[in-house]
Amino acid sequence: MSLVKTARPFRLGTTSFIYPDHIVPNVEKLGPQFDEIELLIFESKPIEYLPPKADIDTLARLSQALSVTYNIHLPTDISLSHGSKKEREAGIDTVERVMALVAPLAPTTHTLHLDFTAQDRAAGKEGIKRWQERAINSLDRLAARVTDPRLITIETLDFPPEILFPVLDNCPMSLCIDAGHLIKYGYDIAALFERYQSKIPLIHFHGVDFSFNPSKDHQGLDKTPMERVAPTLGVLKQFTGVVSLEVFNLENLTASVAWMANHFFAETNFR
């Protein structure tokens, strides 16, 4: 795979786990070819799982040397929407700690999951309302503890995006559209983009293989039927933020880059 950093409608990124190695070696290999790397900090427990300061210093140097920026995927082992206030407070503390740790990297965004559990689903409309209230309360508390809450993006997951509307409308945080999740579950990306276009700095893009039951996401883009991915291409033609090819091995990344070249970048000298 050989890419050239050149003018594109949006900046192109991928994850820090393409090669089965730590974050720094991945950035060393991928940084020369991509505009941005999505640093995956999925685990915060125990605290030793967080990147050491020496790695942060190295990543800061690589950012300058390779002309690459970073966005951060915040830990997924926390919850700011949990039914337990203690769990929510612990989640707020963790997000604040991680954001302080990575601050020397000047991340463009910090992406956060708001988990919506089977128990939340089973509680119906009242359960959704309580979930929204908990999420808004947690995000308000978090916003008061960080420098710029707009640098936190709430990611679309497996639940209908409409559930997030009251949260996004009542908090200063931004939105990360995960296009792969929307494709997998059949949600309307065009309507979501139109509603929140000014609040979307980041789109996660990955393929969905519908030959499996249940279907598998985070695959190469070549695995997705064109009729299912076409609405996302329409959105990308209007988007000027960062598109992160959110896959986790070289095979899926290579296939995704080739797919992008064939279906999108032919007119922008992508190679």
Image: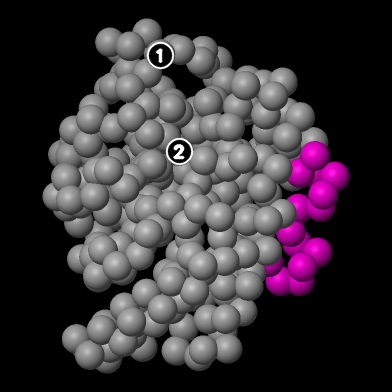
Instruction: Using the image, determine if residue 59 lies above or below residue 62.
Output: below
Q: Quadrant of residue 20?
A: top right
Position in image of residue 231 (x %, y %): 17, 39
Q: Which residue is mark 1?
A: 7
Position in image of residue 22 (x %, y %): 74, 45
Q: Quadrant of the N terminus?
A: top right
What residue type is disc 2 on? Ser
Image: magenta residue range: 43-57
Residue 28 visible somewhere in the drawing: no
Residue occupying image coordinates x 50% and y 46%: 109
**Left or right: where does residue 71 sit relative to residue 135?**
right
Instruction: Using the image, determine if residue 243 lies above or below residue 259.
Output: below
Position in image of residue 215 (x %, y %): 33, 57
Residue occupying image coordinates x 72% and y 21%: 65
Q: Which residue is mark 2?
A: 244
- Residue 145 is covered by the magenta coloring: no
**Badge 2 local density, few (<14 within 10 Å), some, or many (20+)?**
many
**Which one is nearer the viewer's eye here, 167 or 222?**
167
The residue tagged with tag 2: helix, strand or loop?
strand
The answer to the question of whether label 1 and label 2 lie on touching residues, with beta carbons closer than 8 A, is no
